[in-house]
Amino acid sequence: MKAVIMAGGEGTRLRPLSLGMPKPMVPLLGRPVMEHIIGLLKRHGIDEIAVTLCYMPEAVQSYFGDGQKWGVRLHYFIEEAPLGTAGSVRACAPFLEGEDFLVISGDSVCDLDLTAAMEFHQAKRAQATLVLFRHPAPLEYGLVLTDEEQRVVRFVEKPSWGQVVTDLVNTGIYLLSPQVLEQIPPDRPWDFGKDVFPALLESGGGLYGVPGGGYWCDMGDCGAYLDCAADALSGKVKLDMGLPQQSPGVWSAQPIPEGVTVIPPCWLGPGAAVEPGALIGPHTVLEQNSWVGRRSLVQRSVLLPGARAEERTTLYGAILCKGAAARPEAVLNEGTVLGERALAEEKAVLLEGVRLWPARVAPAGTRLSRSITSSGRREPLLFGDGGVIRGVLGEDLGPEALMTIGGVLGCEGKVGLGYWGGNGARMLAQAAASGIAAAGGTPLAHDLECAAQAAWLAEHHQIPVSLFLEQEGDRIYLHLFGRSGLPLGRARERKLEHAVAQGDAPRVPAGQIGEVVRVHAGCDDYAADAARRSRLHRFPMRSITVAVPGSAPADRAIRQALSSLGCTVLDRWRKGVPAFSGLHGGLYLSAQDESGTLLDPGQLLTLVCLIEMEDGGGRVAVPDGASAAVDLVAAGFHGTALRLGRDGEQALSLYAALPWLRDAAFAATRICSRMGSSGEKLEALMSKTPRFSSWKREVPLHGNRGLLMQTLAEGKAAAGGEGVRIHTGNGWVYLVPLSRRPALRILAESPDLEVAAELCDFYAGRAAQLDRELSRQLPPPEQRESPAGEQL
C-alpha cells in the first residue's frame, strides 16, 4: 500500500517554536517529527510515499530529498494555494494509480498499529477507514461514534463534557479507496472532516472506524510538544531514540560529565554540554550543541540546537528554540518559550505561558507576565508568483504594513479598495485607506466580494491601481491590479517593494489629505457586464441549465453572471448538467461536465481558446505557464496564440481585451454562451480540445539559478517569456524559478501520463544534480559579498 504524508502545515498554534520552519520539520529527539512518521510507515511495510507541501516546501525537500537515506521513495506535491486536507491529497491521484492508500499527518507523534488498520480496511472493503485513538481528555478533538460492526454512525466536533459519549477521537490517519478521491473536486479547498466524511456518512458509503492501538498525540501547541517529548522519554510512545543508552532512562551521545546530576529520563544530543553542579531532568531534552551552565536546574524542558541556559538559571516546563539563551539567574516558568535567538537577560523572570518571539528580549531583572511577539514584518514584503502578496495577519501583514502600502499606492491618486473574509481584512483595509488618504490619494471603497471583481472594477472605471484584501483564517492575500484589470507587472511590483522596504510613504499637509469615496458599482453590475461582453452575439442562444454548487464569493459571482446570461442555475450538480466553480478569488475556473468528469483551470482555458478560434477573433494571449494544448488549438485553426512574457505589450493588450481568458465568471459565461448557441454539451466541447496529461514537481535550489536555467535549456527552449519551455518530441516541459523561495517548478505535459511523469522526474533529477554541482562552486558563506559589496 502507498501512503500520503500531509506536510503542508504552518503550525500557527505552535509558534514561536514553528516560526521559520514548517510544522513537520520541528525537531523531536534530534530529528524532524516527520522523520519519525516515515520510520513508522517503513516499519509497517510502506515505502512508496507522496508528501503534500504548502508552507516552506523547500525545507522539507532539502532535508528528505528522494527518501533513499530512509529506505523509502518520496514524491512531492506542492500546493500553490491551500487546498484543505482532502484537496491536497486529491492532487496526488496520479501517484496513487487507483489503489487503496493511507493518509497520515506529518506533524503527529504516534506508534499506532497501521498494519492491523490496513488489514481491517481491506477485510471490510471499506471506502474509508478512520484510525481512532482512545483519549482520556477528548474535548479538543473530533469524536467518532461507531456501531457494533465499527461503521461510523456519528461525528461530534470538539464536544463539551456533556457531549462526550465516547473516548474515541479522530487521529487524522485514514485508509481510503480510490472512489473517495473521485468525490473531491480539483484545485479547490476541500476537507476530509468537513466535506468528505459527512458526505460518505449521509450517503451510506462504507465508512468505518477502528481503534489504532498504541500511542497518538496531535502536536498542536507548545504544551503538546513538551508532552510528546516527555512521553517519548518515558516509553509511552515507541520512537527511535537515535542515541546510545548510557544508563537506565538516559540517552546521550557522550558520557555524562562528572559533577552533573541527571534524573532520568533524559536525552542529550551530540555536542550538548552540561557544566558541573547542574541538575537536569526528569523529562529533559538537550538537542545538538545546546549548553547548560553551572548550578542550573533544567526540568521537563527542551533546549533546541545551540540554545543556552547559563549559570544558576531555573527552567521548568520551558522550550528554548535554536540559538535562544537564558542569562545567569533567569527563571523560566512552566509554558514559557524563547523563540529563535530570543534572550531572557540576567535575573529576568518569565511567568507561566510567556513567550518571546524570535530575537525578542526580556530585559534584565524584569518580571514578565505577558508575551512579546512580533507585530511587524520579519522579512521584506515581496510579491509572490501570480502577483499576490501573502502573509500572516499581525505578523507579516499588520496595520503598520498596510499604512505604508497605502501611502505608496496613494501617490497614484485614486486607489480602488475592497476586502473579504473577516475582521482582520476589514481592519487592514481601513489601515490602507488611512495610508492612501495620508499621501493625498483618494481611496475608492467598494463592496465587491472577490479579487476578480476588483480587477474588473479597475478596468471598468480606469482606476490606476486597485487593492483587494482577502482573509482565510490568519492568512492574508493582497491582490493588486492596474487600470487594465491585470496584475501590476514586475516593474511596478519592484517599485512598491522598494518603497515599502524603505518606509518611503509620503505624507501631505492637512489640507491635502484625501477622503474616502464610495464607488457605486456592485456585484450585479459585474455580472451584467460579464454576460454582455462574453455572449456570442452572432448566434441566437437557447436557455441552458447549469449548476454552481459553491457558496464562496467567486461562486456567487459566477451564479449571477450565468443568470444574467439567461441560464437556469441550480445550486447542486446532477448528472446531465455541467457545474462551474471559481478558484483563487474568481481568477480561475474549474468545472464538472455532464458525466461528472472534473475539469481543471488549464483544460478550461484551452476550451475558451478554442471558442475564441472558432467564434471570436482567432487570436488569444495566455500566461507563460499555460498548457501546450493552447498552441495546438491555435495551429489547428491557423490562429495566433501569444504568451505574456514572450510577446510583450502585444500579448498584454490582447489578454486585457479578452477577460474570459483571466476571469472565472467571464469564462463560464463565454462557455455557456457557446453551449447555448450550438446546442453542444460541455463534454462534447471538451472532446474537441487536445488532451494532455501533466505532472508537476518542485526542486529546492541552492546554487546559481541563472546558470542552472541556462544549462537545463541547452538551446532547446522556446525563446522569451518567464521560465523556459522545452519541446522534447513526445511532450513539453516548462521550467520556471519561483519568486518567493529558492526553488524550481517543473511542469511536464504529454498525451501519455506515464511519459509526462518520466519527463518531470528526468528534469527534476537533472536540476537537482546540476544544483549540487553549482552549489559546490559557491564560496563559503563568510566569503560571500552582500548586495552593497561588503563581505558578510
Image (spheres, helix red, strand yellow):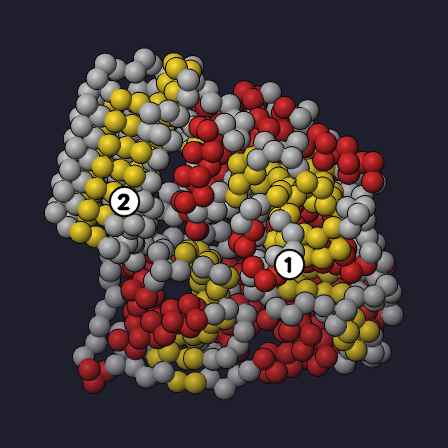
Residue 270 appears in view? yes
Of the numbered discs 2 and 1, the one sitting upstream in the chain is 1
The residue nearer to you, when weighing 169 against 727, is: 169
At label 2, the amino acid type is Asn
**For the residue labelled by badge 1, is the local secondary structure a helix, a strand or a loop?**
strand
Drawn side of residue 560 relative to residue 654, left or right: right
Residue 783 appears in view? no
User: With respect to residue 196, does 438 lie above or below?
Assistant: below
| Residues under numbered marks 2 and 1 in contact, where contact means CB atoms less than 8 Å apart | no
Drawn side of residue 338 relative to residue 546, left or right: left
Residue drawn at 29 percent across, 64 percent down: 400
Q: Quadrant of the N terminus?
A: top right
What residue sits right under mark 1 in the picture? 156
Where in the figure is residue 187, as x and y percent of width and height? 65, 54
Are there few (<14), some (14-19), or many (20+) residues within 10 Å of tag 2? Answer: some
The residue nearer to you, when weighing 373 against 319, is: 319
Residue drawn at 47 percent across, 76 percent down: 462
What residue sits right under mark 2 in the picture? 333
Where in the figure is residue 752, as x and y percent of width and height? 77, 37
Residue drawn at 44 percent across, 28 percent down: 233
Q: Which mark is residue 422?
A: none
Marks 2/1: CA–CA distance: 35 Å
Are there few (<14), some (14-19), or many (20+) residues within 10 Å of tag 1? Answer: some
Q: Quadrant of residue 684?
A: bottom right
Where in the figure is residue 322, as x and y percent of width and height? 31, 35
At label 1, the amino acid type is Val
